[in-house]
Image (cartoon, rainbow, N blue to C red):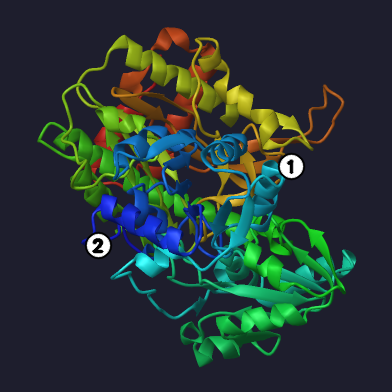
Amino acid sequence: MHQNSVRTSSKITAVGKLKALRQLMHKEKVDAFLVPRADRHQGEFISDNDARLTWLSGFTGSAGLCIITLKNISLFVDGRYWIQAESEKSNKQIKVQRLEKKLIVDWLTSSLNKFSTVAFDPWLHTSEEIENLELGLKGYLKIKPTVNLIDRLWKNKPKEVVSHAYKLSEKYTGESHQSKLERTAKMIKSSRAAFAIYTLPDSICWLLNIRGNDITNTPIVKAFAIQKDTSEIEIYVDKAKITSELDKKLGPMVQFFPTENLKDRLRQLRGKIWFDSKSCPFAIRNYLISRKTSWYDTEDPSTRLKAIKNATEIKGSRLAHLKDGIAMVKFLNWLSKNKKHGLDELSIIKSLEKFRMLGKKYRGTSFDTICGSGPNGAIIHYKASPKTNRVLGDNDLLLIDSGGQYLQGTTDITRTIQIGKSSNKKKKHFTLVLKGMIAISRMSWPVGLSGRDLDSIARYALWQEGLDYDHGTGHGVGSFLSVHEGPAAISRKNEFELKAGMIISNEPGFYVADSHGIRIENLLLVKKASPNKKADSRPMLRFETLTFCPIDRNLLLLKLLTIDEVKWINNYHRKIQLKFENKLAPEEKSWLFKACSPLL
C-alpha cells in the first residue's frame, strides 16, 4: 500500500468527454445518466479503474454523484467537498450542488420532461438508493438500469491489479474464522433466514481473517459472499487471487467460485434472504427474482460484530498507536526544524511516510494523507497534487490528517500546526475546536446512547460563537481494515448504540474558505466506566484515548480554557512524555518535553 491520489489519464478533453457521453446517451435514448463515486462493493475507497466520476468531472472526493442530461450537468457533493469540488471540476459547465435527496429529485424533474428516461449502472447504486429515487420521482420519470456508458467511452482505462489474498494470524485477530462463521450462522438462523449476502469486502475479510491489496490504503480483497444458515460460506472472487495455500488454511467450510458465477447463484436462492439495501447493489437485488424469496433487510451479520474489538484487537490497537505516536513525534520534531526552509505539502507528506516506515509491521498509510497549508487546509478532504502543491507561508496553519496500517491495527490522527505567527482569530478558532475535542474525550454517558447523542457536545463551544463544521465528529475504525468503519459514528445522523470495544475517532474542526482549516483528531476506545457509588450505579460508558501526540500549545488562547480543560491537556501531555521518553533520540526527547511542558 502507498500514497495514491485517484487520477485518470486520457487524451480526450473534459469538454470532449461530455460531448461523447451525450452523443452516446442520444444513441441509447437516455435522457439522463447517473455517474456515482462508487464501485460494485459500495466502499468509500475505490480502485483507479472505478474512478468514473473523476474521469468525467475531475472531482476526486470520496462521495459524490454527477447527473448528466443532454443539456445540463450537475455534481452533487456533501459539505466536506463543497470547496474541493469547485476547485477540481474539469468543465465550467458543471454546476456543483449539495448532495441531498430532495435537491437531486427537484433537479431531475426540473431538467427533464415527464416520462424521460434516467439510466444508471445497477452495480454502482444501492438497492435503497434506487428505491428512494423512484419514490421521490413518483412516476414522473422512468428509471432503467443499463450497461455503464462511461466504460464504453473510457479509453486506456486502468486494469484491475491482481494480487494474492493472505491469511491474517490469530495473534492479530484474536478469533478464528471458524468461530466467527459459527457466530454469524447462529445470527442467520435466529433471524429465520436461509442465506445472508455479503457485499462489503471488509465484512468478508474480517469474517475469514483474510487481507489483500485490492484497494490502496485498505487491505481488503474484493469479493461477494453467500453464507448459509450453517457455517458454510461461498466466496465469489477473482480466483487468481486465491492460492492453494490459503484455500487449505480456510478449510472445506469456505468455498471459492469465480465472480461471474454469482448471478446464476443468486437466481437459485430460495427462502428468506438477509441482505443490506443500504450497501447491496441494485443488480444483486434484481437477480433475486424467485417468488419463493423474502427479505430480511439490515446490515450484514458481521457488521456489528467486527465493530466491537476483542481483547487481542484492543491490545494490538494500543500497540499500533504507540508506534504511530513515535512516528508523529519524530515527524513534528523534524518539521519544527525545517518548516522555514521552503517546505511544500508534497515533501511534508513524503517525510511523514518515511517516519512511519520505521515502525515494525507497518503496511502503509490508512488513507491518502491530507496535508493542507493556509487556504488548502480549509478543503476538508484536500489532496495535494503537483497542480495544487503549496509552499508553507510564514503565517500559515498546517493541517495534517494521516494514519497508518499496522498488522496490529489502524490509526488516524489529525494535528493542526502553527507555522510562524498566528492571529488571535486563528488561535480562538483552534481553542474552540480543542474544547470540543476535550469535551468528548472526558465524557461518561449512560449505556444505550448513540453517536447522535454525543455529537452536539463537540460543537457546543463553537455554537456559542455562531460557528460549526460540515462533517461528523467521529467515525468507527477497523482493525487492520478500513479506517472508516460502520455502523457506529459520532454524528447528527448516526443512531447506532455505542458499545464497549468500539474504536471511534474524535475530530471536531473549523474551516474558513481561502484562509485556514483546523481539525484536531484522536482515536478513542469505548469502555465500561466504573460505577459511581454516590449516584444510582447505573451502567455507564467512557472513552480511553488511544492516540498520543502533542497538541500545538502555541495555538492556544488560555483565557478560553477552563481549569479542568487545562488539567486534561497537561495530563495528556504528561502521558505522552512517559510513553515516549525512552524511545527517542536526545534531540527528539528535548523537543517533546518542550512541546509537552505544563500550560500553567
- Does residue 583 appear in this view? no
Residue under the point 66% across and 29% down: 454
Alpha-carbon neighbours of circle 1 within 10 Å: few (<14), some, or many (≥20)?
Answer: some
Q: Position of residue 137 (x, y in %)?
A: 67, 43
Q: Residue furthest left?
A: 341
Q: Is residue 128 above or below residue 416?
A: below
Q: Callout 2: 10 Å neighbours few (<14), some, many (20+)? A: few
- Number of marks: 2
Q: Amino acid at mark 1?
A: Glu
| Residue in the image at 52% along x and 12% along y | 563
Q: CA distance from mark 2 to mark 1?
A: 46 Å
Quadrant housing residue 214:
bottom left
Label drawn at residue 10: 2
Q: Which corner quadrant holds the N terminus? A: bottom left
Q: Residue at x 32, y 49 (%)?
A: 58
From the top left corner, tell me how far across and down residue 131 is, in percent. Answer: 70, 52
Please state which amino acid type lies under the numbered disc 2. Ser
| Residue to which mark 1 is pinned | 497
Element at badge 1? loop
Which is more toward the observer, 462 or 443? 462
Q: Based on the displayed image, in which of its 4 quarters is residue 591 positioned?
A: top left
Direction from residue 479 to residue 1 in the image, left or right: left
